[in-house]
Image (spheres, rainbow, N blue to C red):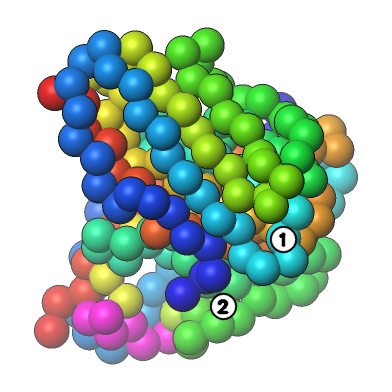
Amino acid sequence: DSGVTQTPKHLITATGQRVTLRCSPRSGDLSVYWYQQSLDQGLQFLIQYYNGEERAKGNILERFSAQQFPDLHSELNLSSLELGDSALYFCASSVALGETQYFGPGTRLLVL
Amino acid sequence: GDSVTQMEGPVTLSEEAFLTINCTYTATGYPSLFWYVQYPGEGLQLLLKATKADDKGSNKGFEATYRKETTSFHLEKGSVQVSDSAVYFCALPSGSGNTPLVFGKGTRLSVIA
C-alpha cells in the first residue's frame, strides 16, 4: 500500500458524460501527478500540481481539467467523454518536486 | 526530450531462471532512474531506484545499476518466481526542472512453474 488513495476504483459511463476522479496523496506529500494508461498510448503524464498550484502540463486534452485543494487532495475532471478516453487513470504523489513518486491503485474508466 | 527505451515483451521464463530486462535512456544530465512494477489488476509500485551514476538499486531480489557510460539501467533477478509475473516499467523524470515521469512501454513478464 503506497498510501495514495483513489476513488472510485471503477467507473462506467456513456459518451458525452462528465466524471470526476479523486485522489488523496500520501500524508505530507505536496505534489500530485495524474497519468493516463491506455493500451495504445502507454503511460502518459497529464498534469502536475504542487501545493495547490499547477506546475506542469503534459498531454492533457482541453476537455480534461484538474485542481488541487487546500487539503492537498486532487480531482481530475473529464468531460464530453469519448470512447477513446477509456483508460486507467493513476494519481501519484511526492513529498516535494524531484522526489520519488508513489502511485495510487488507479481508477479504471470505461466509456460506452 | 528525455526518453526511455526498454525491451519489448512479452518475456516468458521458467521458475528459477535468470531475468534481464533492458532499459536505456536519453537524458540531459544525470537524472534519477526508476523501475516500477504493475501486478495484474493493480496499480504501479516502485520496485527500485538509483539516484546517481554507478548506484545500484535493489529490492525483492531485483537489482539495477545506473550506468552512465552506456546510458543503461537494466533490471536483473537471479531466480524468478511465479509471483514475479507482472509488467515492468523503466522511468526517469522528464527533465528541464520538471519531475513528471517518462515511462518505457513496459515489459510483460510471465513466469511458469
Tell me: residue A37, above or below residue A25.
above
Mark 1: amino acid:
Asp
Q: Which mark is residue B16?
A: none
Q: Which residues are magenta?
A: B78-83
- In the foreground, A101 or B23: A101
Tell me: residue A53, above or below residue B110.
above
- Specify few, some or many for label 1: CA neighbours under 10 Å numbering under 14, 14-19, or 20 or more: many
Q: Residue at x 37, y 80 (%)?
A: B18
The chain holding disc 2 is B
Residue A53 in view of the camera? yes
Q: Residue at x 45, y 80 (%)?
A: B77
Residue B110 forms part of the magenta stretch: no
Mark 2: amino acid:
Glu
- In the foreground, B86 or A11: A11
Q: How many marks?
A: 2
Q: Which residue is mark 1?
A: A29
Q: Which residue is mark 2?
A: B63
The chain holding disc 1 is A
- In the foreground, B5 or B46: B46
x and y percentages locating residue B89 in the rendered image = 47, 54
Q: Residue at x 67, y 42 (%)?
A: A69
